[in-house]
Image (spheres, grey):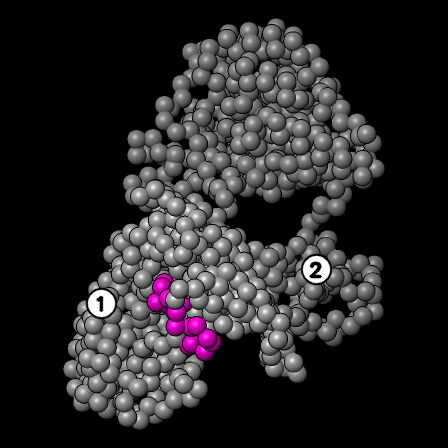
């Protein structure tokens, strides 16, 4: 049986699944339920200095849905904890005492003054918590007050505050990054330079989920007005995966531990984050949608896959996909694939045809000899994969690589087995001379 | 009167009052909005979709389903009515399992088609319940067209003619319009007076005058209609019933299934409708199923359909056969009627002969079976009452009116559509398509001079 135990910057937990700092981790009651359900750790919902903030008294969430109202994306305008600091600290202390084997991290957000940070660090330390996470990510509300993503968008501030925290506490410091920037590597480098033990990402994406066409108010609507919120859930996973990978493969931050966050809903999502270099993962929307019991699926699914794939522990596959993330310019231009439609599996919906015909390369037939039939025209197929993506039947259309020496009917050229990329291509004005 | 389930002979009130309501409730209760959304989401929006090809009226099914899925049921209804103004009834009565839903790629993929019929009902219900009309009459053309028969073909034809600005008079021999929608079709497929509501919806466009109890050959004559109108459309269906041609057919207790169903459809109180304790239905089509199932639902203890060939030759769809058996109807094959056994002038049993195929032909084997039966329904097909056509020059083939692809008969002023013609299957949706297309052909002919 695969060993799911996790050691993240010295913080140990029985599995790599932490609940992210968010509504599910706002109170002792919820966190106890999470630990009873089997979660490996929690990042306690962000604490601030008193007087504690207040939240709106209307809707805090908006959403987009797929079929059968499957929740695909959630938008949140809730701020940090709206309970007194001491209440939270007392609860953290008893929870950590009662669950010594679980990770308890405390998320923090205070004004950008060293004295503020030192004040709260001292108090958190007394709870016995395992570490802190600096909330430089929240894109709504707090950012208007110079905190959250307002800090995360300025690398100099990230470095400065991280440095204060490293100097002010013995606890490991995790810096939580906002995706609402142009290049995630800069804030990550700043955290690294400030001495962060790790980064966690992504926080939520600034968003408006929908507009009410009767009232013309954005949703969620507070008395007819809406404010942008933070977007999370399955819809943001691809964005998060890329940002995790960017940091994992950046020379300056290589080796900096990453706690992966962003739309993790299933064990498979988690495995993908781990493969791209996350040392562990944090989950929120999935728990908010289905409750804490999903931890059973997450841990069992991950362990079953690890057993089948022969990964004895997390370290044996964490980061395994990182070397395969590269720049476009290094992709092998001599690799040629063609779509292939399995006629036995084809249900004749014609989506591949119309997608290719209307929007791509006219490389699929709609009839053959007057009969409805969808076949790839190799002379036209550029191997773009759109037909695979729109086909409703899994594995009906495959992208088959052409073997070495075979003629690509589109170009009339033989498939060259050697690797050749854009940097060497004759059409590239800036190409490097071949050795 | 207390229900008496086992009373011998043909008797009313076999069930308790509330049982009738349950038994004759909507066969497919309408989809809720959420159910419709989930069902609509399963549609793949196929290219050149096979379901459209399979629909006799060629409704743009992927489009109307996408309109439901995106929260525009009104637009969806518009898409449906563009092709089929009786889309509401067709949604209820079409044998979708042999038409659009059989062709659905999800039927091929997983044996579970998109619920096209029920989605069509959802969208059309939204529009019709709000009385939303999508079509306006064109400028009056000054042309007059007589439509004979207010069934699906006649109504579809009248609506399309009215759209083009022609004045239409629709004659029907019965007290109510609707044809088989009103007098045929199983009651549980069209509940709550839907057939009349649809007639009102279709004629609300204006320019359509309905003349009830105005039967061709009885109250009106074809030559007079031709004289008074610029064109005539005939959609009179098949008003006569094939006979069994066996001994005892005339005794009390032997009835035409279509007449019985018409009586049932018009009954104010089903508990007053007499039905046999032991019912035998002769036939293998939709009418046989409809009368058998409804007899069972009225409280008949035993209902047996006897069909002279095998299951695969039955005109009733697989779905309809399963529906019948699920209601407790027995379906027996390879049996043909030989003699009605009477006692005291009333049917008491039916003697049937076993049949088999001999060299591709059906033949009796000589062996017989006698089934007790106090009520015997004939459901072996209907035929055209051709006498009413007079000598207007309309030609018949195989007992039905000869028409071309546009519904034109041999008389250049007469068009025809629906079951009375030899074209297409005898389905509501086919009749609608033929009525609609004939209207276009009539319009083209009438506007030919000034085009």
Residue at mark 1: chain: B
| Frontmost residue, B393 versus A358 | B393
Residue at image position (46%, 75%) is B247
Image location (x, y in percent) of residue A342? 70, 64
Question: Is any part of residue B69 visible from this angle?
Answer: no
Image location (x, y in percent) of residue A297? 67, 32
Residue at image position (43%, 60%) is B374
| Residue under pointer 1 | B175
Q: Secondary structure at mark 2?
A: strand
Asked if badge 1 and badge 2 are on a common chain, one would say no
- Give how far apart the Cα atoms at labels 1 and 2 are: 63 Å
Count residues near mark 1 (Cα–Cα under 10 Å), then give few for <14, some for 14-19, many for 20+.
few
In the displayed structure, B146 sits above or below A356; it is below
The answer to whether residue B416 is magenta is: no
In the displayed structure, A237 sits above or below B392; it is above
Residues rendered magenta in the picture: B242-261
Indicate left or right for A319 with B224 as reference.
right
In the displayed structure, B319 sits above or below A282; it is below
Indicate left or right for B27 with A391 as reference.
left
Q: Quadrant of residue A61?
A: top left
Could you tell me what secondary structure mostly forms the magenta stretch?
loop
The disc at residue A398 is 2
Tell me the quadrant of the picture where the C terminus of chain B can be found.
Answer: bottom left
């Amino acid at each position: 049986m695969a060993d799911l135990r996790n050691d993240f910057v010295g913080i140990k937990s029985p599995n790599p699944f932490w609940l992210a700092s968010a509504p599910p981790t706002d109170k002792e009651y919820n966190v106890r339920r999470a630990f009873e359900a089997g979660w490996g750790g929690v990042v306690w919902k962000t604490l601030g200095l008193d007087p504690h903030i207040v939240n709106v008294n209307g809707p805090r969430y908006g959403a987009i849905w797929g079929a059968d109202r499957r929740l695909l994306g959630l938008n949140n305008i809730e701020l940090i904890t709206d309970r007194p600091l001491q209440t939270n600290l007392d609860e953290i202390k008893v929870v950590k005492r009662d669950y010594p084997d679980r990770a308890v991290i405390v998320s923090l957000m205070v004004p950008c003054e060293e004295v503020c940070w030192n004040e709260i660090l001292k108090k958190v330390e007394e709870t016995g918590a395992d570490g802190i996470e600096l909330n430089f990510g929240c894109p709504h509300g707090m950012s208007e007050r110079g905190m959250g993503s307002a800090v995360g968008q300025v690398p100099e501030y990230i470095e400065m505050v991280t440095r204060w925290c490293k100097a002010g506490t013995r606890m490991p410091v995790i810096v939580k990054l906002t995706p609402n920037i142009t290049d995630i590597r800069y804030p990550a480098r700043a955290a690294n330079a400030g001495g962060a033990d790790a980064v966690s990402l992504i926080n939520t994406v600034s968003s408006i989920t929908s507009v009410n066409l009767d009232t013309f108010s954005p949703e969620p609507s507070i008395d007819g007005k809406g404010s942008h919120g933070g977007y999370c859930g399955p819809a943001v996973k691809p964005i998060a995966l890329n940002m995790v990978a960017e940091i994992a493969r950046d020379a300056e931050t290589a080796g900096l531990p990453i706690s992966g966050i962003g739309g993790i809903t299933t064990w498979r999502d988690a495995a993908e984050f781990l493969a791209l270099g996350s040392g562990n993962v944090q989950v929120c929307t999935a728990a908010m949608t289905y409750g804490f019991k999903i931890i059973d699926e997450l841990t069992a699914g991950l362990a079953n896959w690890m057993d089948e794939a022969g990964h004895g522990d997390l370290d044996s596959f964490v980061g395994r996909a990182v070397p395969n993330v590269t720049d476009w310019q290094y992709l092998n231009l001599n690799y040629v694939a063609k779509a292939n439609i399995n006629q036995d599996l084809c249900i004749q919906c014609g989506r591949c045809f119309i997608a290719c015909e209307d929007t791509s390369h006219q490389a699929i037939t709609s009839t053959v000899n007057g009969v409805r039939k969808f076949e790839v025209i190799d002379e036209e197929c550029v191997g773009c994969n759109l037909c695979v993506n729109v086909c409703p039947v899994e594995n009906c259309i495959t992208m088959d690589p052409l073997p070495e020496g075979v003629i690509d009917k589109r170009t009339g050229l033989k498939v060259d087995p050697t690797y050749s990329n854009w940097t060497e291509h004759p059409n590239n004005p800036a190409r490097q001379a071949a050795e | 009167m207390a229900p008496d389930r086992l009373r011998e002979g043909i008797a009313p009130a076999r069930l308790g009052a509330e049982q009738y309501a349950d038994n004759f409730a909507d066969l497919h209760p309408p989809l809720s909005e959420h159910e419709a959304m989930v069902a609509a989401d399963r549609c793949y929006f196929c290219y050149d979709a096979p379901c459209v090809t399979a629909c006799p009226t060629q409704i743009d099914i992927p489009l109307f389903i996408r309109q439901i899925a995106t929260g525009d049921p009104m637009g969806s209804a518009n898409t449906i009515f563009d092709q089929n103004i009786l889309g509401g009834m067709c949604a209820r009565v079409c044998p979708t399992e042999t038409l659009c839903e059989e062709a659905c790629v999800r039927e091929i993929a997983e044996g579970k088609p998109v619920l096209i019929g029920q989605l069509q009902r959802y969208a059309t219900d939204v529009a019709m319940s709000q009385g939303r009309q999508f079509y306006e009459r064109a400028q009056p053309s000054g042309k007059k067209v007589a439509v004979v028969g207010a069934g699906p073909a006649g109504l579809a034809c009248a609506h399309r003619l009215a759209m083009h600005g022609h004045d239409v008079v629709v004659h029907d021999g019965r007290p109510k319009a609707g044809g088989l929608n009103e007098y045929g079709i199983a009651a549980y497929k069209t509940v709550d007076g839907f057939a009349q509501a649809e007639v009102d919806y279709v004629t609300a466009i204006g320019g359509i005058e309905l003349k009830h109890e105005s039967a061709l050959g009885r109250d009106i004559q074809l030559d007079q209609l031709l004289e008074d109108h610029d064109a005539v459309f005939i959609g009179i269906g098949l008003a006569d019933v094939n006979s069994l041609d066996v001994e005892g057919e005339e005794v009390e207790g032997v009835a035409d299934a279509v007449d019985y169903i018409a009586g049932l459809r018009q009954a104010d109180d089903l508990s007053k409708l007499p039905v046999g304790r032991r019912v035998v239905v002769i036939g293998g089509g939709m009418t046989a199923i409809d009368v058998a199932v409804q007899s069972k639902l009225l409280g008949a203890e035993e209902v047996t359909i006897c069909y002279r060939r095998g299951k695969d030759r039955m005109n009733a769809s697989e779905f309809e056969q399963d529906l019948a058996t699920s209601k407790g109807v027995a379906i027996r094959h390879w049996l043909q009627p030989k003699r009605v056994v009477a006692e005291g002038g009333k049917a008491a049993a039916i003697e049937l002969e076993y049949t088999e195929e001999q060299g591709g032909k059906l033949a009796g084997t000589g062996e017989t079976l006698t089934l007790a039966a106090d009520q015997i329904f004939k459901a072996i097909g209907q035929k055209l009452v051709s006498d009413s056509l007079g000598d207007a020059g309309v030609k018949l083939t195989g007992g039905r009116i000869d028409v071309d692809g546009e519904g034109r008969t041999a008389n250049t002023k007469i068009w025809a559509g629906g079951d009375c013609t030899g074209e297409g299957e005898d389905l509501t949706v086919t009749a609608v398509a033929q009525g609609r297309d004939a209207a276009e052909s009539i319009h083209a002919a009438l506007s030919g001079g000034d085009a």
